[in-house]
Image: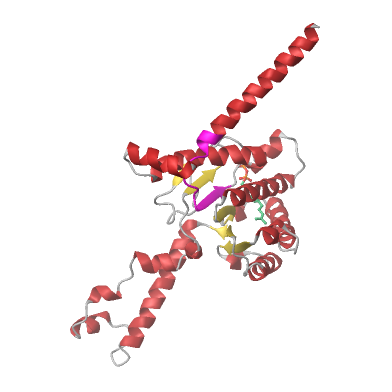
Amino acid sequence: MEGAISKQGGRLFENISSFVRQCIFSVLSVGPVPSHIAFIMDGNRRYSKKENLLDGDEHRAGFSALINMLRYCYELGVKYITVYAFSIDNFKRCPGEVESLMKLMQEKIDELIKEESIVNRLGIRIYFQGNLKLLSDPVRSAAERAMVKTASNSKAVLSVCVAYTSTHEIVHAVQESCEEKWDEIRKQDANNSVGNLIGLEENGKDKDEHLIGVTDVDRHMYMAVVPDPDIIIRTSGESRLSNFLLWQSAHCLLYSPTALWPEIELQIAKYQIAACRFHWSWSVVSDDPLDRLQYFVVDKE
Ligand SMILES: CC(C)=CCC/C(C)=C/CC/C(C)=C/COP(=O)(O)OP(=O)(O)O
């Protein structure tokens, strides 16, 4: 008898807590859906230690979390998803780890571009961004194959940053911008001595028009194919950017949940995204409280 009562009590408690969770989730889920979320998938090795995984399995678990997050973001209507999969600094890790991570990447890229893969079923286009020349031939070819094979998918975009660091991306974009400007100058002033800026001034032209500006650099960023992120999520409680999207993160929200990246199963993905969306919504909707209220009411309908 006592057992039956405590069982019933337990069930009642479960129902109430599930109802409260649902309410919290509904409150968190109002407001606009971000167009672009970027992820620093941090904490794979810590997870592996915690769960006593075999060497190499830490990033395999990380890849499963990526698929969960991808699926949920797609369901929610987030059009652009970007992940920091391997930085240029990561090449300094022990050779065994770099080799096993590269092998995993090659294997998973090939899996991703199969006809029946989640990427093709959902119509997701994949870009690999970074200094791809630093990758081994098989990994680079797999990345290029993936970009070609998914080029006609148009429902969402997954950008995978590999052999990537933001400072390298910025230097690369500035160099490309300079080269483009020099080409323009050479074309415009074919009769003058090539690239002689003093000569151009003597011809009465505005010197400033030959300087490179923000929009020039912007256009030459690897990430120029997608809009800037609204939110960067770095798991494992770290709140540093670690050379990721420095140029593109000028106005974005950095969110640092304590969960380790491989712990992101579907349910956790749902709650983490809802929580950071809530923070973000309040920062993008007007400062006027009445405007905000109106926005959320309209959005809910
Ligand atoms: C095809 C494809 C997109 C594959 C992605 C595979 C994947 C999940 C890569 C992440 C690698 C990485 C350096 C994670 C950071 O955790 P960490 O190793 O720094 O862990 P720690 O912070 O606990 O040390």
Horizontal side of 191 relative to 103 (left or right) equals left
Residue nearest the observer in this picture, 246 or 91: 246
What x and y, as percent, mark residue 125? 61, 63
What x and y, as percent, mark residue 174? 41, 67
What x and y, as percent, mark residue 297? 44, 40
Residue nearest the observer in this picture, 251 or 132: 251
Verify whether residue 129 appears in magenta. no
Q: Is residue 280 visible?
A: yes
Q: Give the residues drawn in magenta, as a range.
A: 26-40
Horizontal side of 146 relative to 115 (left or right) equals left
Indicate the quadrant containing the N terminus: top left, top right, bottom left or bottom right.
top right
**Is residue 72 positioned above or below 278 on the image?**
below
Residue nearest the observer in this picture, 7 or 105: 7
Point 52% across, 50% down: residue: 37
Name the image quarter holding residue 117: bottom right
Q: Is residue 255 visible?
A: no
